[in-house]
Amino acid sequence: VLVELRAAVVADLEAAGKLEWAKQDFEALLEFTGPPERQDPWRRTSGIHKIRSRRALGIVRELWYARDAIAQERDITPGRILQDAAIVALALTPPTNVNELKSDSTMQRRGPRRYLDEWLAAIEDGLNCSDDDLPTTGQKSDGPPPPRAWADKDPVAAARLVRVREVVNSIANENNLPTENLISPSAVRSLAWQPPPQPSDETVSQILGTAGARRWQLELVAEPISAALFDPPLG
């Protein structure tokens, strides 16, 4: 069945003029080693913006890593073991003993209650961590902020992102592709947030290529994205 399916997919790709695109994608997959390891992945905990103190951040960090270790051992999504909202709640009002933890609203589900000892140990590690080892607050990310914040932080970049997205959406529609298959949304955001001083087809191709774009993608998007990055736009 798989051999027949492969033949059918090849026929569809040839008819759509996309077989070479697929070959380039397959070649890229052979060299793909995974995304770079994220620094301080626990900082992506949903709701962490509510945390204001370094001590509470330390508790978030310890709970996140405790949950991650359990998730890896059980081969299950971390959020099914302990939700991000529960981590934040426990960090804001940390229980000091197992009875307090047991009665906490975050522990009413059977899943989290299975690991009371692990959660309490993580909370104690956060509470007892030395000041020097506590994480800092307000750490800036290397990447651009969430797009919803662009209008306040940098209106020019926000307008640039709108123009680039319109270009990408148009090209994707013309080629019957999901936009994320045409070009990586994160690469588009990074380029729109901090474009090269003099955008050109070559520099845009180089930046997107470094981000993992294949030749077929660059041939479609480099020139129109380059034009869209100009402020005011060309034309």
Image (cartoon, rainbow, N blue to C red):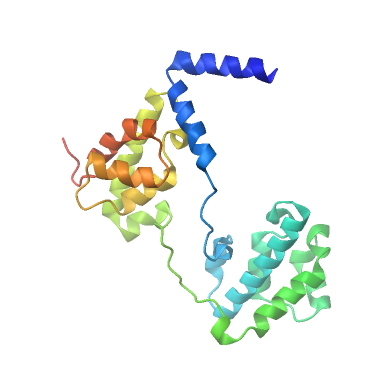
77 left or right, relative to 110:
left
Residue 178 location (% of width, % of height): 47, 31
Residue 206 location (% of width, % of height): 31, 44
* Residue ID at (33%, 54%): 151
Residue found at the far left of this picture: 235
**Quadrant of res 109:** bottom right
* Foreground residue among 219 and 125: 219
* Residue ID at (48%, 33%): 25
Report if residue 83 is visible in the image.
yes
Residue 55 location (% of width, % of height): 59, 80
Image quadrant where one finds the N terminus: top right
**Quadrant of res 57:** bottom right
* Residue ID at (78%, 65%): 107
**Quadrant of res 108:** bottom right
81 left or right, relative to 35:
right
219 left or right, relative to 200:
right
* Foreground residue among 37 and 122: 37
The correct choice, above or below, for 17 with respect to 118 in the image is above
Looking at the image, how many numbered discs can be counted on the residues? 0
Image quadrant where one finds the C terminus: top left
* Residue ID at (44%, 27%): 21
The correct choice, above or below, for 129 with respect to 196 in the image is below
44 left or right, relative to 109:
left
* Foreground residue among 229 and 4: 4
Residue 172 location (% of width, % of height): 40, 29
Report if residue 103 is visible in the image.
no
The correct choice, above or below, for 234 with respect to 69 in the image is above
